[in-house]
Image (cartoon, rainbow, N blue to C red):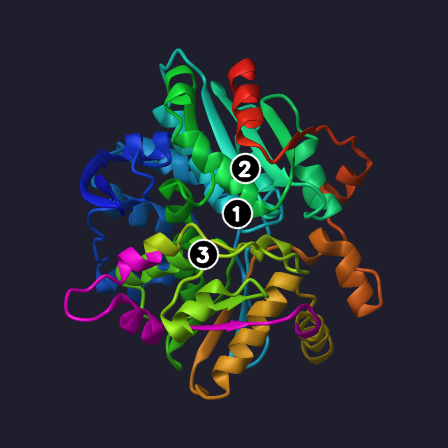
Amino acid sequence: MQLYSTRNRNNLVSLKEAVLKGLPEDNGLYMPVRFPELEKSFIQNLHQYTFAEIGFEICSQLFNGAIPEHDLRNIIDQAISFPAPLVQLDEQKYILELFHGPSLAFKDFGARFMAQLMSYFNRGENQELVILVATSGDTGGAVAAGFHQAPGIKVVILYPSGKVSMLQEKQLTTLGHNVTALEIDGTFDDCQALVKQAFLDSELKENIRLSSANSINIARLIPQSFYYFEAYKQLAKDGNPVVFCVPSGNFGNLTAGLIAQKMGLPIQHFIAATNANDVVPEYLSSGQFTPRPSVRTLSNAMDVGNPSNFARLLDLYKNSKSSTWNIMKHSISSFHFSDSETEFGLKEVSDKYNYTIDPHGAVGYLALKEYQKTNKNTRGIILETAHPSKFNDDVERILGHKIEIPERLAKLAKLKKEAISIPNAYPVFKDWLLKQY
């Protein structure tokens, strides 16, 4: 398997190099040279395969022998060890629950797969691998859980001070061992900028083996494509065309869906649902991409003002015969909603369907509802990206009653937070890394 940089298609690397480096030196993003189309018979008979078997088939075709079959099966079996059930709200709307993993968020799929893949590629290395990751909420907890105590790997998680929920913060600041949390005086975009600058710093690269666990790393996106197939498998074979509605921040999850579509999954359309951080809806409407500082919202994991994976979206839609914007706006619809609208959506799902959704899923619900006003003959799947109890204070305030908190999350509230506070200043961050590693 070969991958190229979105900034230079002649910059080719192996799967191992792409996964361990995370980011090309030209500051692009790695993409596979080819997306093989899966056999139609496989798609038609998805119901005969387990979730892990679906993942194996996708990776087997995509990796093209880069990892021996036995090792690949073991990687996927270790990573994909929990379900992604589809819950029907009504004849048009479904919820894909992606919160049944250790950290109760969809990012468990990518983080656990990446941890297994990196551990496999890191075997025999004398120098430890240092994972840098910026989080707006759920990524940090998933990465911390996925990489906890992984041999030969250290993890440094940067998160914006005061801008993640209490339980999200506890997930990434209480594990210790090989996981260190840095509390940054800034926004998620500031955290992400620090991580990107570190990857481009020649002095750091000479002294530290760095890699990333954000969705800028292709190893995060590949396993996220698995659950699009898993969702489709759970629908009735006959019925209206299928659309996916994706609550979106850094746009990795949507990119993974587009990869699934490229590999043959019959998805008719995608809906990108955002909060007030609406740079992609603005682009799809006007053709102008204008990054700006993120603003804080109820759906904090989507508080991204300059989504990294937008570069991959542009790359996927490049076409010599038509403008990228022209093609993309016909393939992806996008809607954005305020916090007050998000609260309304959360209450409506509870009242109408007796289902408790989280704030990110509520944004997705509103977007699908809006899309289906003019596209009635569709079956829409909303990606429910996190368990509502991760946003306990807000969800209980909005609904006016207590919600159940899973034991593995509730026990974190009693643990002591361990984090290192640093300013939003690259020289300070760099100096800390050099002294630490």
Query: Which of the 4 image quarters holds residue 345?
Result: bottom right
Amino acid carrying label 1: it is Lys
Q: From which residue to which does the magenta span run?
A: 313-341
Residue 265 in sight in this render: yes
Query: Which of the 4 image quarters holds residue 260?
Result: bottom left
Residue 169 versus residue 196: which sits nearer the camera? 196
Residue 265 versus residue 176: which sits nearer the camera? 176
Picture quarter with the N terminus: top left
Residue 277 versus residue 49: which sits nearer the camera? 277
CA–CA distance in space, label 1 to label 3: 13 Å
Where residue 229 sits in the image (x, y, percent)?
38, 60
- What is the tally of numbered marks visible in this picture? 3
**Disc 3 designates what residue?**
251
10 Å neighbourhood of mark 3: few (<14), some, or many (≥20)? Answer: many
**Disc 1 designates what residue?**
107
**Disc 2 designates what residue?**
143
Lateral position of residue 365 relative to residue 3, left or right: right
Lateral position of residue 124 relative to residue 281, left or right: left
Where residue 384 sits in the image (x, y, percent)?
57, 61
Tell me if residue 339 comes above or below residue 125 in the rendering: below
Amino acid carrying label 3: it is Phe
Tell me if residue 209 comes above or below residue 34 in the rendering: above
Residue at 55 percent of width and 62 percent of height: 277
